[in-house]
Structure formats: C-alpha cells, structure tokens
C-alpha cells in the first residue's frame, strides 16, 4: 500500500452551482434566467424537471455549510445567480440577492471555510438573452458591471474569484449542439459566444482585482485529453480537431496565443466562420483575453477517444468512443479514466505554464441510495475519487502547480438536461423531504482531508 500525501495547505473543497441547488427561483426579487426558460420548455430536460426547488439551498444554506464544516472541508466553490443580483441583467440591483450571498460568505468564513466564487455558471438573465445573449458583444459589458457590483459587495471577504465556468459548455454545447440553455443550434453564433465569454473574462479580471485587493482571479475550463482511436491519418486528424475544438480554442487565447490557426482554417472551410476569418475579434481583444491570471481552474470528468467516421463535421459532437468496458462507465455514460487527470494537468502545466492550478470539479454520477439502515454505500464513488486524487498527486510530482481540489458535488442536484436522474453528490438528497445524508464517500473524504492524503 502506498501513501499519497499532498502539499501543506492543499485546498480540499466541494463544489456546487446556483441553478443546480438554490431553488427559490422567484423569491426575493430574483429575475428569470435562461435555465428557467429552457427547463420549462417541453422536451429540453429529459425528466421534465427544473430548478424551481432543487436542493432548496436558498433556505438551507446554513445547514449545508454546517455539513461541510463537519466534513472538514476547507473551501467551497459556489456560483452566484446573476439574475438574483441584477434581475434584468443590468440596471437595477436587487439588494436581497446581494444580501443572500453576503450571508453565505459570512457563514462560510465563520465555519472556517474559504469561499471560491464563480460569477457565471450558466444562469444568464433571460432579459439579456432576449437581446441576443452572449452572441451580443454588449453582454460582455453587462458581465463586467455585474462583476463590479458583486465584488464591491463581497470583495473585502472573498479572495478567490472564478469568472466563468466551462466556456465550452456555455458556447458550443448550448449554441452549436443546443443541449443546454438557450438551446440554439448555430455554429457561427456559438463561436461568437465563445469569444464574448472570453472577452468578458478578460475585462472582468482587473475589476475583480481592484475591488478585492490581494485576491486570486482565474477562470475554469473543462478539459479532456483527446486521443485517436487508431493510428490512421483520419483518426489522428479527428483527434487534432477535437482537441482544438474543446481544449485549445479556450487555452490558446487565454495564454496569449490567439485562436488556434488550424481551427480557424477548419471553421472557414466548413462555413462556420466567414472567409475573412474570425470577424468577432476586434483589435485589442486578444490582449484583453490574455490578461495574466492567478490560476486556471480545471474541470475533469473523462477523456475523449476520436474515431473519424463517428464525427460528422457539421455536428462535431464530443462523442467519446469508450475503450473501457461498460462496468467502468459512470451513470452519465462517461468512461472512468483517472490517468486522464494526470495527463491534462501535466500537459497544461508544460504547454501553457499557468501560475497555479486548481481542480475545480471532478466527481461521478452513481445512484446508490440509502439502505435499510439509511446508509449510502457508494463504494464506486469512493474508488473513483481515490484514483483521481492519486492521479492528481502524480501530476504534482511531475511539476504541475496544483493547489487544490474541489469534489463535484457537495449535494445531489439538478444535472442540467438530465434533470434529477444523475446523482453526483457526496451527500444524498431526498428531494421529497430535503433530508441530507452524507454518503460513505463523504465520510471517507473527511478522513482524506484530515490525513491530507490517500492510500491505494
Ligand atoms: C460540469 C458542470 C457541473 C456539473 C458537472 C457534472 O460540466 O460544470 O455543473 O453539471 O459537469
């Protein structure tokens, strides 16, 4: 048995997001978000549910924070619902919305838990969507105002800020593939969105720094190691393209390298960009996007194995060819592949050199339910987390400046287009009674945090 000890002060945390847990969708002046609208559109969420109640965290945040304290969690990554703070996206500020997040921050700090605040985890105010949403460059300006309002209120106490969560999802998954809100299928629009998201990030960084002296500011990307299913030239090229589409399209501009030229060429060829190129990019934008950050957040769930004949170019669905047997997939249908975390962290470190890295999400969907004694024996989740923690430790050995790890998720919650069918929590949520039961994985995680390491 080997022991994998983590560096001193390693930040062990849990993560959630506003729409997935808060509920209270119309309370205290919260405006409508694109996820309210989308989830209430028939056929969009596969169990027909929405986030109106979710985990009722809006009313139960004190208990949920007490639960985290009991687990020994050092940090909590949560997101702020923009339409709670600015119900119409810009203009009038909703004091009750700001007060809610103020109370969360104070309760966390009193519990000895450091807040990591994500500004945008996909719940755009519907009023901004009505004006074109992120296809509209003005939404980037509105985001900066929102960042300013929020950080002026919380910046004295919040010292870790994440501008965006997974811009690939907020742009391509939701505007090209159309599986997430606002459910558009228009490749060119999706690419505009990707640029405006990154631009809004770069514009917000100095604002957050000004309002939150000494804070660390970064962005979270979902990254996937991409491998060809065979050595054929066509599969190799499919893997190159997918890596560009999913990883490099975001990493390259953030680290000062412009959008990848091979991808711009592919998109022009496919008609997703006009022949003149990426015309949304105005002079100065790339410098703004490349504003140096204090850290990069990495969300990792699985790898992608590309086989050329399975990737229709017009769709480019990130379909993972599973090499592992069915028993090694989670209930999301995602292959369990812990070494991919080591691979992606090491690659990002070597190729891009971020000042610091956090794993801002990693976790697994398994539906193990309470047994007769009310205990949730989710051994598969514990094994999943242990193997990924070890992979992260190996990345640190390889030099990656990894400073923390946030398990997705604290609670079972609303899993977007899958509704409540997927349970990612280390804490079971009974959606009828809102009772919480820490699963075995949560009790195991408490021991990991206390020991600052794992054994295999
Ligand atoms: C990520 C999201 C998070 C959750 C997990 C399973 O893409 O950031 O909200 O849905 O996947």
Image (cartoon, rainbow, N blue to C red):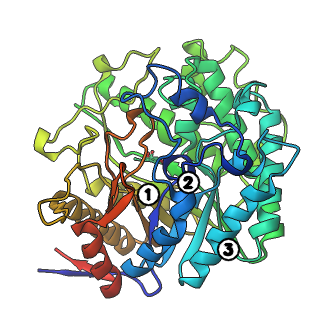
Residue 361 image label: 1
- Asked if 379 appears above or below 128 in the picture, the reply is below
Q: State whether label 2 is within 8 Å of ligand 1.
A: yes
Contact, CB < 8 Å: mark 2 with mark 1?
yes
Contact, CB < 8 Å: mark 3 with mark 1?
no
From the top left corner, tell me how far across and down residue 168 is, in percent: 54, 38
Helix or strand or loop: what does disc 2 sit on? strand
Q: How would you rate the neighbour count of disc 1 (Cα within 10 Å): few for under 14, some for 14-19, many for 20 or more?
A: many
Label count reads 3
| Residue nearer the viewer, 88 or 119 | 88
Residue 7 in which image quadrant: bottom left
Can residue 90 be spotted in the picture?
Answer: yes
Q: Nearer the viewer, mark 2 or mark 1?
A: 1
- Asked if 13 appears above or below 323 in the picture, the reply is below
Helix or strand or loop: what does disc 1 sit on? strand
Q: Which residue is at 63% across, 60% downward? A: 218
- Report the quarter where the N terminus lies: bottom left
User: Which numbered disc flags the more N-terminal residue, 2 or 1?
Assistant: 2
Residue pointed to by mark 3:
159
Residue 13 image label: none
Indicate left or right for 223 with 293 as reference: left
Q: State whether label 1 is within 8 Å of ligand 1.
A: yes
Residue pointed to by mark 2:
220
Q: State whether label 3 is within 8 Å of ligand 1.
A: no
- Asked if 387 appears above or below 88 in the picture, the reply is below
From the top left corner, tell me how far across and down residue 305 is, in percent: 29, 35
Mark 3 to mark 1 CA distance (whole Å): 19 Å
Indicate left or right for 204 with 432 as reference: right
- Asked if 252 appears above or below 241 in the picture, the reply is below
Mark 2 to mark 1 CA distance (whole Å): 9 Å
């Amino acid at each position: 048995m080997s022991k994998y000890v983590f560096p001193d002060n390693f930040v062990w945390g849990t993560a959630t997001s506003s729409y997935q847990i808060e509920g209270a969708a119309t309370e205290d002046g919260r405006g409508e978000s694109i996820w309210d609208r989308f989830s209430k559109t028939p056929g969009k969420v596969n169990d027909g549910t929405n986030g109106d109640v979710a985990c009722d965290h809006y009313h139960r945040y004190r208990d949920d924070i007490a639960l985290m304290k009991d687990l020994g969690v050092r940090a909590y990554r949560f997101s702020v619902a923009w339409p709670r703070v600015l119900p119409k996206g810009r203009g009038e500020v909703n004091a009750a919305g700001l007060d809610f997040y103020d109370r969360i921050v104070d309760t966390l700090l009193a519990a000895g838990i450091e807040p990591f605040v994500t500004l945008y985890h996909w719940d755009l105010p519907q009023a901004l969507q009505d004006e074109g949403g992120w296809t509209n460059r003005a939404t980037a300006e509105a985001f900066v105002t929102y960042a300013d309002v929020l950080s002026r209120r919380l910046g004295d106490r919040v010292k870790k800020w994440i501008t965006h969560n997974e811009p690939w999802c907020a742009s391509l998954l939701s505007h090209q593939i159309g599986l997430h809100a606002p459910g558009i299928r228009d490749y060119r629009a999706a690419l505009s969105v990707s640029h405006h998201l990154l631009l809004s990030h770069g514009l917000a960084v100095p604002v957050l720094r000004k309002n939150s002296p000494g804070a660390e500011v970064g962005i979270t990307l979902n990254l996937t190691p991409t491998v060809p299913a065979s050595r054929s030239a066509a599969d190799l090229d499919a893997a190159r393209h997918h890596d560009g589409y999913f990883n490099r399209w975001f990493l390259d501009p953030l680290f000062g390298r412009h959008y990848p030229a091979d991808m711009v060429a592919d998109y022009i060829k496919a008609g997703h960009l006009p022949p003149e190129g990426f015309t949304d990019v105005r002079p100065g934008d790339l410098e703004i996007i490349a504003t140096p950050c204090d850290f990069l957040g990495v969300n990792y769930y699985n790898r992608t194995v590309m086989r050329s004949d399975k990737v229709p170019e017009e769709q480019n669905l990130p379909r993972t060819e599973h090499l592992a047997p069915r028993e090694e997939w989670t209930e999301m249908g995602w292959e369990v592949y812990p070494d991919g975390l080591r691979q992606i962290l090491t690659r990002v470190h070597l190729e891009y050199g971020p000042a610091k890295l956090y794993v801002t999400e990693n976790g697994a969907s398994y539906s193990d339910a309470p047994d007769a004694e009310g205990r949730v024996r989710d051994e598969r989740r514990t094994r999943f987390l242990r193997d990924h923690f070890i992979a992260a430790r190996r990345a640190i050995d390889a030099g990656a400046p990894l400073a923390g790890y946030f398990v997705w998720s604290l609670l079972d919650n609303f899993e977007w287009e899958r509704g409540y069918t997927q349970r990612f929590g280390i804490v079971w949520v009974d959606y009828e009674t809102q009772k919480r039961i820490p699963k075995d994985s949560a009790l195991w995680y408490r021991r990991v945090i206390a020991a600052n390491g794992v054994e295999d």
